[in-house]
Amino acid sequence: MFLTIRISTRFDTLDYVDLHSHVLWGLDDGARTPKDALEMLQILRSLGFRTVYATPHQKQGEFLPAAPDIAARHADVTRRLQEAGLDLDLHLGAENFWDEVFLERAQCDQQPSYRKGPEVPSGRDTPAFLLEFPVMQLPPRLIEQLFAFRLRGRLPVLAHPERYVPLWGQRARLEQIARTAALVVDLAALEGAHGPERARAARYLVQEGLCHAVASDLHQVADARPVAAGMAWIKKRLGPARLQALLADAPRQIVAGQLPDLPG
Ligand SMILES: [Fe+2]
């Protein structure tokens, strides 16, 4: 299958950065085969992404691929990209679930973070790291804990803030979190791929300027259609400049460890 939805701007002039994807095959619930991985990356390139961060799950009891396996898989997919002649930089990150493993790693400042490839020696590369919470219950003393990361020079990046039920309709709380962590909405959620409540929450965050960036969170080839639809939705409702800010400017700032300004 190849994607038929395209946003109208020529993709080869775009330089979007995807902060959240599951394109490394066989590590989590994302790509299953090398073929899937390559096809997903070809689709992301066709949508205008020139830089993709692979963020395999790090979740105790479910998906906890080891660092050497992730590095080996990254090298494998990078080689396949080169063989296919695809002009796309694939870098590494991780989607850290807020569990005991994460908290232990964070105590030693060793939580897997956004980095620029397997050649990076052990230890952190960039200050930014991707994080997810249980959807029904936020961690206790959340703001204090997020702020403690900032005091240590780190930038927490919250995946799919539209999913967290305790934040639905809680504007003041969202504003408080957005002053401390980068909020990155899933593109597919904007078009209802994750249900009407998450769609409402995602649209609210993007329209009200309460999120810093958006990302694909691509798990399989079939996810590409709602991702493209989410991009088209932003472009139509908020204009191409906002799409550029959410998919290119802000992600670059985030990976550099800076919390982007929110619009307005
Ligand atoms: Fe994810």
Image: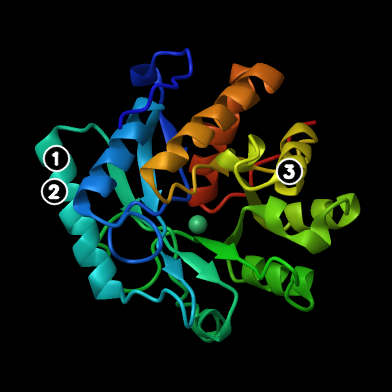
Q: Amino acid at mark 3?
A: Pro
Q: Is residue 49 above or below residue 70?
A: above
Residue 261 seen in the current view: yes
State how far apart marks 1 and 2 are (Cα): 5 Å
* Label pair 3/2, CB-CB below 8 angstroms: no
The residue depicted at 27 percent of the width and 56 percent of the height is 117
State how far apart marks 3 and 1 are (Cα): 39 Å
**SS of the residue under disc 3:** helix
**Residue 79 disc label:** 2
Residue 33 is left or right of residue 4, and the answer is left
**Residue 205 disc label:** none
* Quarter location, residue 135: bottom right
**Residue 196 disc label:** 3
> Measured from the top left, where is residue 150 in percent x and y?
65, 65
State how far apart marks 3 and 2 are (Cα): 39 Å
Residue 154 seen in the current view: no
**SS of the residue under disc 2:** helix
Q: Nearer the viewer, residue 143 or 1?
A: 1
Label 1 neighbour load within 10 Å: few <14, some 14-19, many 20+: few
Residue 141 is left or right of residue 215, and the answer is right
Disc 1 target residue: 82
Q: Amino acid at mark 2?
A: Arg
Q: Earlier in the sequence, mark 3 or mark 1?
A: 1
**SS of the residue under disc 1:** helix
Q: Is residue 178 above or below residue 196?
A: below
* Label pair 1/2, CB-CB below 8 angstroms: yes
Q: Nearer the viewer, mark 3 or mark 2?
A: 3
> Measured from the top left, where is residue 210 in percent x and y?
76, 42
Q: Quadrant of the C terminus?
A: top right
